[in-house]
Image (spheres, grey):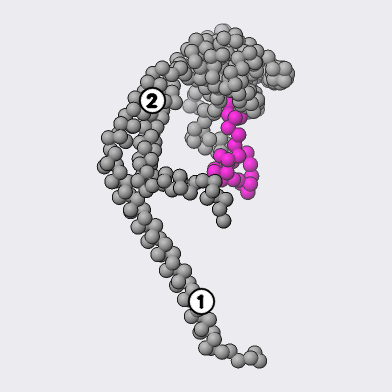
Amino acid sequence: SSEELDLGQLFSFIERGVSSIGNLILKGFNFFLFLIKKLVILIVLSLNIIKKHLLKIVAAGVLTYILFTMLDRYAEPIYQSNMIVKQNYDTGKILYNNIARYNLLASASDSVALGSELSISYDKAADIVGLEVFDDMNEIDLLQRYNEHLLTIDTTNAITFNDFKKRYHLESHPIQVISVNSRTKTAFDGLSNALVKVFQNNPYFKEEQRKANEHINNKIKDFESMLIESDSLQSQYFQLLKMYYGQSEDQDPANPTFNVNLSSSKDKVNTREYELFNRQNEIKLEISNFKDELEDAKEILSLQKNFTPPVKKESFFSEFKKSGTFIIMLLVLLFYVLKEIKVLELVETYGTQEKLLEK
């Protein structure tokens, strides 16, 4: 506040700043035009070289295509097949780790170790070249799991569907697909049972299976006891219904019978006995569900679908036949472009030890 502002110096400083920025933009624009000009020249040069050496470039591409075709014909065939398994226990991480280990052994051609792991012959293990496991869950299944997740948590802690997809462990999904690549079709015979038995013989999962079966059996016994106790009230319930619905006029009083139609349009008597009758049906349904769980619990990893008929995979040469031909043609073109601009002569002239050591 005690010094005066020199407007002339201020405007001079602004002018120099704007001038520097303008010069920088102009240099950048000129460099961009230089690159465009050189690129156009390179394209025209390439077109000229293609015109002069078209037959050679095409011949190189045709020979490469023929070579890849011949190599594909005589390449060792690889067959692929998939099997589907259901995880009845929390085997996801171990399943993925086991398949990854088997894949490493197959990739390393360690048929002895792989055969010992799966309890199969070494010849069959030697034919296996790769294994992979992946989930059989699509976007709709994942969205259903997300909706089920929202029902179990407080709405204030809800996360978005995208965050749920990132956090969800796909290996925990019950249905998993195991894919195997083999040199022969016969390698898949009995392989599915061998993969499943690895888990059936696992001591940890056998103990988990024992505890799960015991837990389910105890639940079944508890519900069966509840059902037996409720049967003692059954006669009282039917007597109540008989009093409510009445007895038919044409019925023989000496031999009374009574048929209950639960689908009757009459209002049902809202009594504890009637509620008990409904509860009995619920108990029977629960027992049926527990028996289904017990049936699933008998197998740690159950085979849902055996290996599909093996399909021959495309070989490396068949897969990259077209792209490999295109790459070879580009390399031939690049060779003639470098030759045209005399890069090879520059390399011979300046790529020497003397040029490196001179001052």
Residue 165 point in image, percent of width and height:
56, 39
**Residue 166 located within the stretch drawn in magenta:** yes
Q: Which one is in front, 275 or 60?
A: 60
Q: Identify which residue is drawn at 65% across, 18% down.
A: 199
User: Is residue 128 toward the left or the right of residue 320 in the image?
Assistant: right
Residue 307 point in image, percent of width and height:
50, 16
User: Is residue 345 toward the left or the right of residue 279 in the image?
Assistant: left
The local secondary structure at tag 1 comes to helix
Of pointers 2 and 1, the one earlier in the residue sequence: 1
The local secondary structure at tag 2 comes to helix
Residue 126 point in image, percent of width and height:
56, 14
Residue type at mark 1? Answer: Gly
Where is the N terminus found, in terms of image quarters?
bottom right
Q: Callout 2: 10 Å neighbours few (<14), some, many (20+)?
A: many
User: Mark 2 = which residue?
Assistant: 68
Q: Quadrant of residue 29?
A: bottom left
Q: Callout 1: 10 Å neighbours few (<14), some, many (20+)?
A: few
Using the image, tell me which numbered label, if any, was put on residue 27: none
Does residue 300 show up? yes
Q: Between label 2 and label 1, give the one nearer the viewer.
A: 2
Is 138 situated above or below 222? Answer: below
User: Is residue 174 toward the left or the right of residue 40 in the image?
Assistant: right
Q: Which residues fall within the magenta stretch? A: 150-175
Q: CA distance from mark 2 to mark 1?
A: 62 Å
Where is the C terminus found, in terms of image quarters?
bottom right
Q: Identify which residue is drawn at 48% across, 27% down.
A: 265
Is 13 situated above or below 76? Answer: below
Residue type at mark 2? Answer: Phe
Is 177 situated above or below 200? Answer: below
The count of marks equals 2
Q: Identify which residue is drawn at 66% across, 92% down.
A: 2
User: Mark 1 = which residue?
Assistant: 17
